[in-house]
Image (spheres, rainbow, N blue to C red):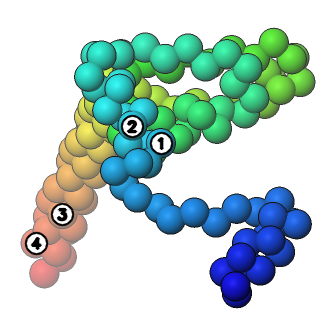
Amino acid sequence: MIRSLVKELLHYINLDIRRYSIVNSHDLRRRKVLDLLGIDLVLDVGANSGQYAKMLRKDGYNGKILSFEPISTVYNELKKVHWPDRKQLVAYTGVVLVAVTIVGLIIWVFDQGLSFLITKLFEAFA
């Protein structure tokens, strides 16, 4: 009786409570279908601000996602959102590692040069 009363009140404010089951999860079913069929490209037509693409990435999808939005104002907002795929992420990571290595080497060279100069100054005035 209390359960039905609560359900009725929640329906009144447009809410529905259901038991969550990982076996019956929409996310799990979508992931299984994408994996089973080997889908490596998803077309997101009417992409709005990229919510579906974000959800796919969160669920572990690593393929390409092409998002289209015919409404220009929404499209301009969609252009601001970019979720790199696995290939891009690996490339970006490589660029960062190379840049950090180069900067580290430059700092090391300056440090060695300054250490050498300071040592020579102390030897000269000591």
Is residue 117 among the parts visible in the rendering? Answer: no
Q: Position of residue 91 (x, y in %)?
A: 32, 26
User: Which residue is located at x 45 percent, y 43 percent?
Assistant: 27
Residue 93 higher or lower than 63, as above or below: below
| Labels 2 and 3: the sequence-earlier one | 2
Mark 4 vs 1, N-terminal side:
1
- Give, as a three-letter code, the residue at label 4: Glu
Q: CA distance from mark 3 to mark 4?
A: 12 Å
* Mark 3, secondary structure of its residue: helix
**Residue 11, how many percent across, how many down?**
81, 64
Mark 1–mark 2 CB contact (< 8 Å): yes
Q: Amino acid at mark 2?
A: Arg
- The disc label shown at residue 123, or none: 4
Question: What residue type is disc 3 on?
Answer: Ser
- Distance from the alpha carbon under mark 4 to that under mark 1: 74 Å
Residue 17 marker: none
Tag 2–tag 4 contact (CB < 8 Å): no
Q: Toward the viewer: 85 or 119?
A: 85
Q: Which residue is mark 2?
A: 29
Cα gap from disc 2 to disc 3, whole angstroms: 62 Å
